Amino acid sequence: MAYSIAIDGPAGAGKSTIAKKVSRELGFTYIDTGAMFRAMAIYFVDNGIDNKDADMIGEACKSVTIELAYEDGAQQVILNGTNVTSRLRDEAVGNMASAVAVYPAVRSKLLELQRNIAEKMDVVMDGRDIGTCVLPDATCKIYLTASVETRAKRRYLELKEKGENPDLSKIEKDIEARDYQDMNRETAPLKQAEDAVLVDSSDMTIEDVCAAIISAYKSKLN
Ligand code: DC
């Protein structure tokens, strides 16, 4: 049986940083499910498909292929045979990903891929519905969150470091809008699973958060 840690939470809570570190420490594979939604989003952006066009989106889901590969341990996402990893973090792609994540056709396509991977190997999988929907029997479930202010500030500093000139209040508004969209959609909305451990990282270091998650995981093995 493969072991799994499901980490869900809102945008900017630090899921990917934490999930990567926890997976390294435990020797598990890190699966970034947001990257799969983002890859689908790239297809819609590149093909001029409107995020309200349910028919076109449903049709596209039948033919688009998404695969994961690993280069030096880092997840790569392959969309229709092309590596699109370098484009995944574009703002427009993130917004499209959140908008199309409401469609059951998109979700069920990616759900199958996510479950197949978790059956074969030990994973730390992060997303919005991993504990509630994708891996209901995960070995350990974590709901990782932080205040809107903290999450916006982290994003602001990240962009500053990249040499950009970000607007903190716009980032806060975007985060609130993304939270609303992710938490209020009909299919698989973001929410804490009943059996998930709540970790609020607002006043915690990365090391503290990882230690809390590893300890929650180990307690499930006893
Ligand atoms: O975690 P992220 O920002 O890369 O995710 C991008 C969008 O994809 C997010 O706004 C909602 C959607 N998503 C989802 O609905 N379910 C997941 N398991 C992962 C991401």
Image: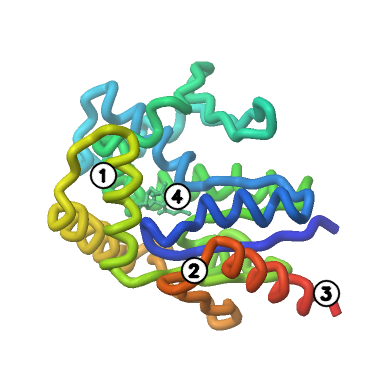
Q: Quadrant of the C terminus?
A: bottom right
**Is residue 183 among what the camera can see?**
yes
Q: Are marks 1 and 4 in contact (CB under 8 Å)?
A: no
Q: Is mark 1 within 8 Å of ligand 1?
A: no
Q: Is mark 4 within 8 Å of ligand 1?
A: yes
Image quarter for residue 216?
bottom right
Please identify, in this view, whether the residue under mark 1 or under mark 2 is nearer the observer: 2
Which residue in the protein does label 3 denote?
A: 221
Q: CA distance from mark 1 to mark 3?
A: 38 Å
Q: CA distance from mark 3 to mark 4?
A: 30 Å
Please identify, in this view, whether the residue under mark 3 or under mark 4 is nearer the observer: 3
Which residue in the protein does label 1 denote?
A: 95
Residue 177 spot, x, y in % from top left:
20, 60
Residue at disc 3, secondary structure: helix
Report the residue at 59% width, 54% height from top.
Answer: 19
Left or right, 198 with respect to 186, comes to: right
Q: CA distance from mark 4 to mark 2?
A: 21 Å
Q: Amino acid at mark 1?
A: Asn
Which residue in the protein does label 4 denote?
A: 107
Mark before the other along the chain sequence, 2 or 3 = 2
Q: Amino acid at mark 3?
A: Leu
Mark before the other along the chain sequence, 4 or 2 = 4
